[in-house]
């Protein structure tokens, strides 16, 4: 942990903004990386409701360097930035903001982080049917990454928010060649989608604090051969993953995506190669304690 006596005028400040953020491991993982490389950086958690004011503050502080953006601000934050990479603008959500001079630049690391987690787990996407639960900021990033960079057969999306759901489905159909289907999340639509899905990706807050122990997918809907990826990482094994594992399915914890995306953020904030082994160890120690 950074010695508070060493904080000075030149210390670069980074933060995670969201609501809630009390559960976030981002401060622990980033600060451990700074300490390992002896970097004059400090990372803090900030619960934020007023995104516009938070980003105005980022502009105002001379030593503010970067922000991680989490639920529910990944889409709204885009309104207040000066530059967004074209690919991320198409996706329609960001999770990273970097201050370069007087400019706030937005980008996304969720999609690449999720794809690396799948590849590292040996999941073959070619010709597979993917079911995505949720259509918010992280879901958008992952959906576009998979649609553009893998050979999946079909991406089906279910959500309870019809406007957000149709917005994502429409954008995917406009900007990618992937086969996309969507429906409101109901017991019937979920059961029908689960019958076809090879890979289930859960992208809603269900299962994280304060809804630990909850799952959108009844255990009886799983079938042999499926892979289940839950982007929730606290707790380390959600009810969804526990139920899938109990039925012999391959499961991928959200901690893999979390570490991958954090490594990419760290490198963008600092310009240094991230000490991934240190960051992983810190995360796992916190989640298992």
Image (tube, helix red, strand yellow):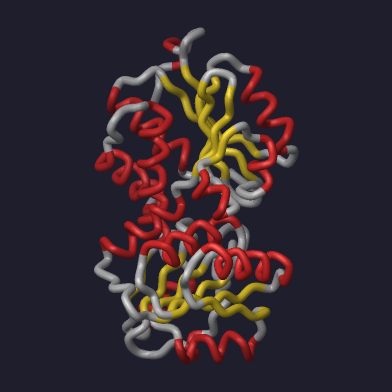
User: In the rendered image of this protein, does residue 25 appear above or below residue 4?
Assistant: below
- Residue projecting furthest to the top: 9
Residue 284: in sight, yes or no? yes
Give whichever of 89, 281 is nearer the camera.
89
Q: Nearer the viewer, residue 120 or 208?
A: 120
Identify whether 70 is placed above or below 187. Answer: above
Q: Is residue 23 visible?
A: no
Up-down: is 257 above or below 106? below
Residue drawn at the location 73% of the way across and 41% of the way down = 49
Residue at position x 53%, y 18% in the image: 101
Q: Position of residue 253 (x, y in %)?
A: 39, 63
Residue at image point 53% right, 76% down: 180
Q: Name the image quarter holding the N terminus.
A: top left
15 in relation to 141, above or below: above
Q: How many marks?
A: 0
Image spot of residue 246 (x, y percent)? 37, 82
Q: Quadrant of residue 104?
A: top right
Q: Position of residue 264 (x, y in %)?
A: 38, 41
Q: Report the residue at 32% width, 41% height from top.
A: 279
Q: In the image shown, does 53 or 102 lie closer to the viewer?
A: 102
Give whichever of 3, 89 is nearer the camera: 89
């Amino acid at each position: 942990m950074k010695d508070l006596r060493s904080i000075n005028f030149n210390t670069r400040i980074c933060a995670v903004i969201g609501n809630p953020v009390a559960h976030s491991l981002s401060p622990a993982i980033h600060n451990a990386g700074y300490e390992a490389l002896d970097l004059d950086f400090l990372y803090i958690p900030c619960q934020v409701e007023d995104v516009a004011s938070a980003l105005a503050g980022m502009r105002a502080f001379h030593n503010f360097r970067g922000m991680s953006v989490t639920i529910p601000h990944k889409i709204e934050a885009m309104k207040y930035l000066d530059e967004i990479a074209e690919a991320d603008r198409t996706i329609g959500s960001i999770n990273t903001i970097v201050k370069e001079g007087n400019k706030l630049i937005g980008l996304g690391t969720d999609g690449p982080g999720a794809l690396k987690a799948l590849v590292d787990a040996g999941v073959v996407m070619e010709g597979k049917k993917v079911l995505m639960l949720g259509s918010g900021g992280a879901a958008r990033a992952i959906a576009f990454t998979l649609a553009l960079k893998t050979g999946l057969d079909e991406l089906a999306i279910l959500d309870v928010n019809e406007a957000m759901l149709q917005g994502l489905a429409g954008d995917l159909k406009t900007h990618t060649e992937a086969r996309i289907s969507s429906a409101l999340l109901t017991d019937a639509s979920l059961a029908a989608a689960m019958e076809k899905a090879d890979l289930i990706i859960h992208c809603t807050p269900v299962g994280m604090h304060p809804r630990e122990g909850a799952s959108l997918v009844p255990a009886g809907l799983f079938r042999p051969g499926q892979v289940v990826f839950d982007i929730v990482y606290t707790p380390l094994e959600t009810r969804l993953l526990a139920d899938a594992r109990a039925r012999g399915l391959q499961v991928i914890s959200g901690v893999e995506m979390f570490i991958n995306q954090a490594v990419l953020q760290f490198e963008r904030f600092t310009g240094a190669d991230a000490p991934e082994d240190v960051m992983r160890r810190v995360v796992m120690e916190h989640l298992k304690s």
